[in-house]
Image (spheres, helix red, strand yellow):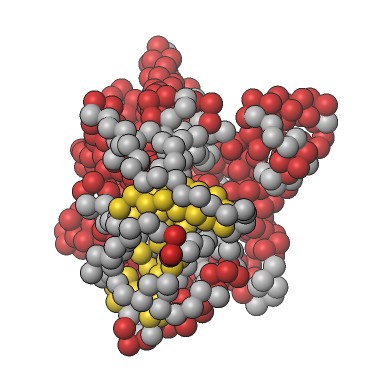
């Protein structure tokens, strides 16, 4: 059972992909699922299925004790996640923010609201977060279902579930980035289809809000603001009007993040500050973001930006080389979150064919909008991919999913109309499946295959005159459901902001600082229900509520990518891990400790604590917890 649950990130999206491909063959033979699906598959039904899939992903982490680089045992926030969670809890209790909180204030407020709803129980918070993510998935699935039918909707669902599943157990901005990005995309499509000024503004605004909550492909904004000038349905003054509305929506999307950063943190100086490190690495020829720390140690964000721009001006060829390397890494990592090679190959094939069809097919307002957004993602890829892996595209994953569904629908219809196209499809299949046989572990093989597949798909569609072919209908566009959903999500962000600003209570720390030995650092910590606990037990005592994992399983699924991997691997059975919030100063952050504690429960109260300076992220001496008591 544990081994099956541990592989769920592989077999769940793979199974969904195979179901979609199983529907591909009947569609090729002329069976129409669209009428059947539109009658029997409703939005509430899709939401229930999406919720079940996301909860399955969380449970797979909890059952096995599997760790994500930002979540120990599927529960304890780690690295960036620990920072976001400590910011959220600090805001929930009326405390201030830190420099870290100012980087992504929207997400900290979002988690703060979910924590309030859950009674600060992190397990419930994660489940609530997964339900909101499932709502966004269901809306996109419903839209794809309206556009291209059931098979396309299922294959799009496999793409989104594969990406969102691993983040379901984490407190990371990818969660809200995906949610807002999906909502913004659907509202934008509604505005484009109806040429409605309100929906155009809301779509651009929420997409911009999503990019500020989880930085990503920002270059989609200048491209999409040009949509009215490419649309045949927009003439004269209408083009300037719609373009202005889109620009206004994008600009307004930046205002909340900057405002929240000033309200709850030290200001906007740290807002998106980590991009300065990435830019300097690109300017240096494609170095990682940490490179600047060794070149200009101790530099401020402004100084790093200045040095990066100077380097770009002085050595533009080096900057160009960095961008080229970034684009190559983007190609190598496309759909890498699909861990089963054949599923990745199939989805990549449909994605490439769908993208090529957007380029060469007849242009409707919706297909033109999708094409411009995709071009914006491609233009952003060289800048983002050096350090960001696929997670930086969280806000545009739903766009990729729609393109995958579009390609699926086109290929199935093409094979119905012309059976001679089987040869081309088989050739594309051989190309995309080749990395599963040759050099599977070499990402450069995937990059080369995707580049070759694009060339073949583009050439074949150009030669077959796709520009004169009728494309699948894209007329029924959701409007009210994404709008209501967006209002709900934004309310989760705004309510904690309003309440905290009016009723802010900065708690006094009652614990006296202890006298620490040399090499130790003293902090004031709060140990209570806001401090999630993961206990390690023997196999017969594992529990999901409260979470207690089997040590053998925890070690088996502990990735070397997790910080302090070696120390975590040595944690003995019958120990507990916990995140504690450091209240030495408002918004100071979080510390991760373990103590010898066999029983379930957590230590409660504000405590003075000494931590080893060298390993302050991982160790604490239970004897130094003043007046600690256990809640059974």
Residue 239 rendering spot, x and y as whole percentages: 42, 18
Residue 540 rendering spot, x and y as whole percentages: 32, 87
Reply above or below: 417 against 258: below
Quadrant assignment, res 509: top left
Residue at horizontal 50 percent and vertical 50 percent from the top: 515
Reply above or below: 148 against 360: below
Q: Outermost residue, front direction?
A: 515
Q: Quadrant of the C terminus?
A: bottom left
Count of number-bearing discs:
0
Q: Quadrant of the N terminus?
A: bottom left
Residue 534 visible from this viewpoint: yes
Residue 27 visible from this viewpoint: no
Q: Outermost residue, top direction?
A: 237
Q: Taking 472 as reference, is 338 left or right? A: right
Residue 258 rendering spot, x and y as whole percentages: 43, 25
Residue at horizontal 74 percent and vertical 28 percent from the top: 307
Quadrant assignment, res 289: top right
Q: Nearer the viewer, residue 169 or 190?
A: 169
Residue at horizontal 69 percent and vertical 26 percent from the top: 303
Q: Nearer the viewer, residue 313 or 97?
A: 97
Residue 256 rendering spot, x and y as whole percentages: 37, 27
Reply above or below: 238 against 212: above
Quadrant assignment, res 365: top left
Residue at horizontal 69 percent and vertical 67 percent from the top: 442
Q: Taking 547 as reference, is 304 left or right? A: right
């Amino acid at each position: 059972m544990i081994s099956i649950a541990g592989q769920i990130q592989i077999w769940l999206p793979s199974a969904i992909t195979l179901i979609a491909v199983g529907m591909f063959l009947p569609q090729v033979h002329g069976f129409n699922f669209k009428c059947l699906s539109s009658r029997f598959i409703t939005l509430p039904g899709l939401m229930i299925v999406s919720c079940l899939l996301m909860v399955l992903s969380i449970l797979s982490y909890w059952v096995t004790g599997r760790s994500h680089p930002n979540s120990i045992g599927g529960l304890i926030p780690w690295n960036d996640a620990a920072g976001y969670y400590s910011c959220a809890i600090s805001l929930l209790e009326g405390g201030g923010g830190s420099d870290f909180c100012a980087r992504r204030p929207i997400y900290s407020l979002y988690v703060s609201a979910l924590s309030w709803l859950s009674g600060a129980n992190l397990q419930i918070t994660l489940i609530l977060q997964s339900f909101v993510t499932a709502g966004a998935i269901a809306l996109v699935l419903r839209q794809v279902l309206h556009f291209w039918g059931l098979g396309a909707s299922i294959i799009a669902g496999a793409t989104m579930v594969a990406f969102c599943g691993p983040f379901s157990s984490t407190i990371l901005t990818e969660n809200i980035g995906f949610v807002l990005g999906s909502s913004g995309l659907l509202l934008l499509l509604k505005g484009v289809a109806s040429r409605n000024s309100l929906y155009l503004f809301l779509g651009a605004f929420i997409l911009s809000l999503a990019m500020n909550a989880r930085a990503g492909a920002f270059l989609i904004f200048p491209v999409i603001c040009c949509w009215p000038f490419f649309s045949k349905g927009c003439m004269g003054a209408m083009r300037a009007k719609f373009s202005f509305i889109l620009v206004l929506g994008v600009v307004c999307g930046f205002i909340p993040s900057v405002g929240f950063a000033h309200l709850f943190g030290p200001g906007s100086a740290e807002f998106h500050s980590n991009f300065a490190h990435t830019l300097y690495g690109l300017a240096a020829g494609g170095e990682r973001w940490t490179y600047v720390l060794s070149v200009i140690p101790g530099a401020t964000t402004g100084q790093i930006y200045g040095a990066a721009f100077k380097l770009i001006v002085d050595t533009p060829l080096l900057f160009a080389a960095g961008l080229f390397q970034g684009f190559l890494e983007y190609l190598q990592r496309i759909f890498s979150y699909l861990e089963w090679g054949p599923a990745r190959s199939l989805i990549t094939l449909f994605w490439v064919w769908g993208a090529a069809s957007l380029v060469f097919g007849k242009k409707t307002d919706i297909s033109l909008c999708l094409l411009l957004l995709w071009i914006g993602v491609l233009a952003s890829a060289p800048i983002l991919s050096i350090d960001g892996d696929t997670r930086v595209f969280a806000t545009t994953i739903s766009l990729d999913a729609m393109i995958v569904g579009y390609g699926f629908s086109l290929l199935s219809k093409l094979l119905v109309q012309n059976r001679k196209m089987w040869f081309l499809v088989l050739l594309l299949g051989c190309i995309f499946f080749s990395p599963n046989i040759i050099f599977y572990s070499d990402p450069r093989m995937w990059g080369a295959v995707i580049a070759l597949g694009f060339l073949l798909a583009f050439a074949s569609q150009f030669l077959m005159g796709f520009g004169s072919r009728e494309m699948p209908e894209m007329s029924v566009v959701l409007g009210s459901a994404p709008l209501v959903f967006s209002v709900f999500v934004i309310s989760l962000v705004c309510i904690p902001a309003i309440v905290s600003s009016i009723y802010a209570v900065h708690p006094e720390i009652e614990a006296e600082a202890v006298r620490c030995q040399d090499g130790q650092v003293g902090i004031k910590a709060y140990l209570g229900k806001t401090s999630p606990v993961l206990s390690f037990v023997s196999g017969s005592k594992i529990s999901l509520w409260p979470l207690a994992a089997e040590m053998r399983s925890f070690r088996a699924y502990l990735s070397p990518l997790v910080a302090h991997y070696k120390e975590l691997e040595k944690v003995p059975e019958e120990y507990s891990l916990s995140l504690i919030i450091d209240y030495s100063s408002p918004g100071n952050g979080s510390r991760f400790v373990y103590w010898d504690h066999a029983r379930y429960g957590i230590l409660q109260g504000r405590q003075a604590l000494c931590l080893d300076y060298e390993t302050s992220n991982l160790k604490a001496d239970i004897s130094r917890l003043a007046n600690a008591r256990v809640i059974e």
